[in-house]
Each structure stands twice: as C-alpha cells, then as structure tokens.
Amino acid sequence: MSSSKILTAIRDITRSKHRIAWLVGGTISSIAGATYILEDKNVDKTSLLGFVRLGRTFVTVTSIVVDYKLSLFGKEPSMSDYQPTKNNVHLRSAKKLHSLCCKNGGVFIKLGQHLGALDYLLPEEYVNTLKVLHDDAPQSSLDDIKKLVAEDLGKTDNIFKEFSPVPIGTASLAQVHRATLMDGTELAVKVQHPKVKAYSEVDMKSISFLLNSVAWFFPEFEFLWLSGEMNKNLPLELDFVKEGKNAEKVEKLLSHFKFLKIPKVYWELTTERVLTMEYCEGGRVNDLEYVNKNNIDVNKVTRDLGKLYSEMIFVHGFVHCDPHPGNVLVWKDSNGQQEIILLDHGLYLTLPNEFRLNYANLWQSLIAANLEGIKLYSQRLGAGELYPLFACMLTARSWAVVTHGIDQVERSSKEDDIIKASIIEYFPQVSKILNEVPREMLLLFKTNDLLRGIEYALKIRKDASSFINMSRCCVRALAMHEVEQCDGWGCFVRVLVNANYNLFKIRVYELVTRFMSLPLMQYISSILWTKEPFEVQPTKVLL
C-alpha cells in the first residue's frame, strides 16, 4: 500500500473513531437518562416511552455503524472477500432495523415499509428483510382497541352486534376489525393504534436522527428526502376524516370504471382515529392461491390497474400513493364480473398542473423513444444532466431499451442483471436525483415501484399493450390543457381534431397489436419474417 493510501486510511479511521465515540456517548447518555426517568414517578409515561424509543434508535444506529466500520476495516473492493463480507453486514444491519421498527412500531413501521420499497436504491438484503413489514406489522391488543373506540364512539357492545377480536388487517398506523351492526350490516372498522399520534413527534425526530447519522457516516447514502416526505405526509395519514373524504372524491372521479370498488364510508361512525367502512369480500391481489382458485384473470387485473393509475395521474392529478398488495383486493361476483377494491385512502398526491403536464409529455416521449423530449421534460422535472438515469429509474428499463423503445423490447433476465449492476455503479447519482427532483416525483416513484411489485407477484411482464391506455390518458390530459388555453372556436376545433386523430392512431395501433398477437398470426409471421431479436447490452447511462 502506498504512503498516501496509508495516510488516507489513518485519517478515515481517526474521523470514524471520533464519530463513533460521539455516537456511543450519545447512546450511553440516552440509556442513563431513560434509567433516571424510570425512577421518577412524576414523569408523563408517554414522554418516558418516547425517550426510550429515541434511546433504542441510538443503540441500533450505533450498532450498525460500528459493524460496518469494523467488518470492512482494511478491506478493498478488489479483494475476493470484500463483497461477501459487505453482504453479511447488510443482512445483519437490515435485521437490526427490522427489529427496531417492530419494537418502536407506528411511524417506524412506515419507515421500514418505505425502505422495503426502494429496490432501485437499497441492497437486496435490506429490501427483502424490510418489505415483509407490509404484511407483518405489529398488532395492538383488543382491549386497547376497544378503549380507543369507546373514547371516540361509545362502547363497542352498544354499537356492534359483533366485533372480531382478531384484526383482518394490520398496518403501520392502524388495524382493521370486521364488525356487524345491530341490523346485520357488515362493516370494516379501521382503528388507529393507540398512542401512535402521541409518539409521532418524537418518532419523527428519532427517524431524522437515524437518517442524518447515515448521511454523516456514509455520505453516498442520502436519505434526508425520506425524512422530509414522512414529516409532510404523516399528519395527513393520521386523519381518518380526511381519508374518508379522499375515498369519496376518488370514487366520483373514477365512477366510469365499473371494475373499481371503493368501500362506502359510514360517517356517523367515523372520527379522526376511527374510520368505519362497508365490508368488501376479496383476496389480496398478490395471493396467487386465491387468484387461481377464483379464476381471476391476472392480465385483466394489471391492465385495469394501469387504466386506473393512468387516469389518476395524467387526467385528474389526484393519485392514491399506497397501492401495496394489502390495499388492493380482487373479487369476482356471482355474475363473473371482476372487481378491484381499492383500500387505504389516507395518502393522496395532488399534482400541480405544470408538473402533471411535464410528466405526461415525458411519458409520451418515453413511449415514442423521443430522446430530445426525454431530455427536455426530464430536465423540467429536476433531473438535470442525469436525465438518462432518471428515465431508467422511471421506467425500470436499461438505457439501451429506453433509446430503442420501451414498448418494443420484452424485458429479460439479462436486462434485470444489467439494471442491478447499474444501481450499484450509479448509486450516488440515483441518491442525488432523489434529493433534487420535486417532492411529487418521490411519491410517484414509490407508487410505480409498488405497482411493479404487484406485476412481479402475479408473474406479469409489461408488453406493448400496457402503454396504450397510458398514451390515451396523456393525449387527453394535454388536449384538455390546450383547450383551456384556447381563445376562440378555431383553436378549440383544431385541438379537438388533433387529439381525436392521435386517439384514432392509438386505437389502430391497439387493433393491430391484438391482431398480430393471435396464435395464427404469430405462426405466419414467424414463417414470413425472420426478425433479429433486440439484444440488450450494458450501456453507459452517464458519460
């Protein structure tokens, strides 16, 4: 090792020791403070438990930082044991974070769910360990739940004929119990976890500390944007009256989709902490056993979800931002009609018009492989000179495919491997994009990732037809904006003619695509035309 490398290593270790000493000192102080407060009978117990949760966060962060520093000390990326060692540290650290989230509960479960959805950013050890929090959130006791319901509505025995002792669903901030009114009406009662609102302030400070500590020790991991998003969105998700209003609003906006079911809200049994809704039968969208048993058409499910979200994003700019599998149910009624039941309306994103139109133009450019348009509208959305990487993050496709046409090339395992390698190579740039794009973009990234997760669970790959309805919605959104800018009949007619012409072209393309996908046509084309398959090669995204 050269003398300059030795000096650099000594400098890094010295800095790390100072930082670790500060962190360990903070942890010891937290534990000592918590011990002292435990002996003080006059201290408010909520404040005490909040302090304990903060101390638990200190301990976990210290343990993770020390593990990384000690395990990787003296190792170079070129060494054969470097990556296996690092992977083991990732796994140990992910398990510690999972344990912290489960012990602290509430907002920390929400943090774990966020991190578990960042498969384009975090090592797979973190993603695989934390994503289970979508299905395995801790439950509150039945006594605590009934006590909260009694405080807000009255005793459950006076309101409900039956109230299930075991929740039918548990999430980070609440859990849902099946109940029956005295007249036999079946309900789903969503009850906020007791104390989650009381703990939210100190929990967010703990999470900010955790993320700032990560940024300090590992500058390439910039997750401060996540803390900002959670601070902004948490109060909205803790207000169940707001959630009920969101549900009614989206039901009106999307009433023309007959396949969509939004549970009815019972306002007389709803408060900020208790949301009472109609009970809907159905199975989780990613439950393949239920899907197969009930002959659910998974291709129709993903197409309908695509229609739903294209309409929300491009046309209305009012977007349900938490479509994880627990919030999307599927059901087939006695007439054989499939339904998608959309739950949990606490977090909606209202897109500013300028953002929505730039986003629509960007997707039109991506579908058309229009590189000038991709650059222009990516930069308008804050990507700067990192626009190729931004396009890859948005589509979850390689740059070679983006430039060729995302609707022209089927995704392959080779492309998946290229994307995984690129995440590692461009990690600092990905983190930079997430810190610089508008906040709306972060929620759309999360929404896109969750929808892709559903497709993956159902073993569905996007094909050319997946982009057809998205194209329609983009055309409609841009035409509606142009009509609003018109100052005369001539302009109005020109815009309508142009929009309908574009919609006609999309319809023709759709019919041709369906016709060519028929088994007979595929057989004929395989005989008459020998088309070389597009070979996805590793391509430099950034020069």
Image (tube, rainbow, N blue to C red):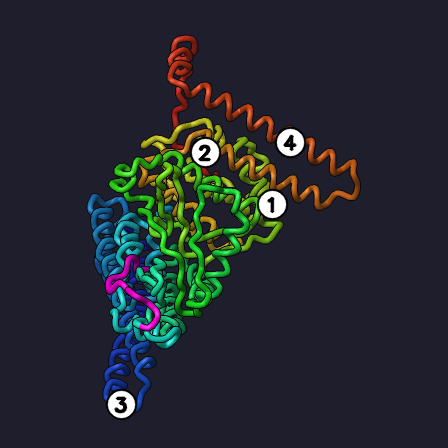
Q: Earlier in the sequence, mark 1 or mark 4?
A: 1
How far apart marks 1 and 4 lie (CA) works out to: 18 Å
Instruction: Give, as a single range, the part of the protein colored magenta.
Output: 158-171
Q: Confirm whether residue 152 shows in the render.
A: yes
Q: Which mark is residue 40?
A: 3
Q: Are marks 3 and 1 in contact (CB under 8 Å)?
A: no
Q: Which mark is residue 500?
A: 4
Q: Earlier in the sequence, mark 2 or mark 3?
A: 3
As drawn, 87 above or below 223: above
Please indicate whether residue 271 sits to the left or right of residue 73 in the image. right
Q: Are marks 1 and 2 in contact (CB under 8 Å)?
A: no
Q: Regarding mark 4 in the picture, which secondary structure is present there?
A: helix
How far apart marks 2 and 4 lie (CA) works out to: 20 Å
Q: Earlier in the sequence, mark 1 or mark 2?
A: 1
Q: Quadrant of residue 504?
A: top right
How far apart marks 4 and 3 lie (CA) works out to: 73 Å
Q: Nearer the viewer, mark 1 or mark 4?
A: 4
